[in-house]
Image (cartoon, rainbow, N blue to C red):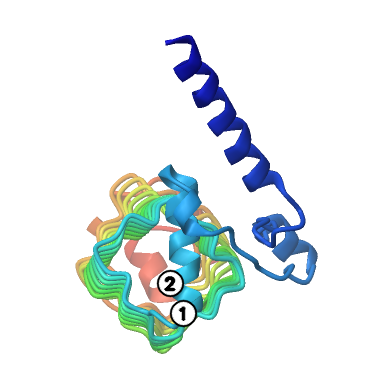
Amino acid sequence: MMQQRLDQRQDRKSLDLLSSSSHVGLELSSVPTCDDAVLGDRPPAKSFRNPAVLGGRAGAKQRFHARYAAGERNFSDEDLSGFDLSFFDLTAVNLANTNLSEAIFCHANLQDANLSFANLKNANLAHTNLSKSDLRRANLSGANLSQANFYSAKLLMADLSYANLSNAHIRETQLFLANLSNVNLKGAEIRDIDLSNINLSDAKLRDLDLCDLNLSGANLKNADLSNANLRRTNFTHGILDEAKLWFADLSNADLSDVSFQNANLLDADLRDSLLTRANFQNANLFDVNFEGAVGLTVKQIKAASNWEKAYYDYNFRQLLNLSSKG
């Protein structure tokens, strides 16, 4: 029995010596982190330990690296959670239905990749190229997608709740029925996309340029749209209850059948907008400019607060029994 224990100890010492040796060519160099990516450092050269001598998660990561280095590109239905794939060229890779939660893809190239049904919860995809990728029904909740490129990507029914999309590039992207509640879109470029019926409740959209977009039927409850450019935007049948719209430009927008209940429109510009059947119940209209607006009724306006402090056309002010001033 004593001899058996001594043999086991000797085996462990041999294995430790093998894994730590610097002269057998099996050392593991560090993988670039997201901090390296932000600082602009060049990624170090990748080398791999022999997968045969590794087990557990460390072994799984090295086996993935070895397969990737050998040219394999089909990793669907696998568990790659927590893997660091920063700077990797993953063009057209198949990661469908793969567990990528908390994985790191900083500066990676995922153009044309298949990520449908993938679990990317809390993953870090900052500066990642996701152009033309397939992210249908993917779980991206809580993911860091800052400065990511989503040009022509498919995000139909994807879950992006609580994701960081600040300064992301979102052009010609398909977002049908995607969940963008509580997302941060500060500084994002959003052009040539259809946002109808989308969930943007509690989203941070401050200072964004959303002019000429289709947001009909969208849920923007409690969203921050302050100082946003919403000119000529289609909001028909949308929900803007409790939204922050102070200093927002809604001129020439279609706001028919929109609910603004308890919204704050302080100093918003609604000139020449269409407001047929819009609901302003308890909304703050202090210093709102309604000049040239179409579809307004006395009942609509008087359901709001501070309606007498807003700006109207001369004839409508007479209907409200206000002085001609303003």
- Quadrant of the rendered image containing residue 37: bottom right
Q: Is residue 81 left or right of residue 124?
A: left
Q: Disc 2 and disc 1: Cα gap in Å?
A: 5 Å
Q: Is residue 209 visible?
A: no
**What residue is at 43 percent from the left and 45 percent from the top?**
55
- Where is residue 11? Give x, y as percent: 54, 33
Work out whether residue 128 or residue 250 is closer to the camera in this orientation and state it.
Answer: 128
- Where is residue 64? Give x, y as percent: 44, 64
Q: Is residue 302 left or right of residue 40?
A: left
Q: Is residue 193 above or below residue 41?
A: below
Quarter holding the C terminus? bottom right
Q: Is residue 220 above or below residue 263?
A: below
Q: What is the number of callouts on the image?
A: 2
- Where is residue 76? Give x, y as percent: 27, 69
Work out whether residue 23 or residue 101 is closer to the camera in this orientation and state it.
Answer: 23
* Discs 2, 1 touching: Cβ within 8 Å: yes
Instruction: Kindly give the residue lying farthest to the front in the view shown.
Output: 3
Work out whether residue 220 or residue 83 is closer to the camera in this orientation and state it.
Answer: 83
- Badge 2 amino acid: Arg
**What residue is at 20 percent from the left and 68 percent from the top?**
237
Quarter holding the N terminus? top left
The disc at residue 244 is none
Q: Where does label 2 land, which residue? A: 67
The disc at residue 70 is 1
**What residue is at 55 percent from the left and 61 percent from the top?**
206
Determine the secondary structure under disc 1: loop
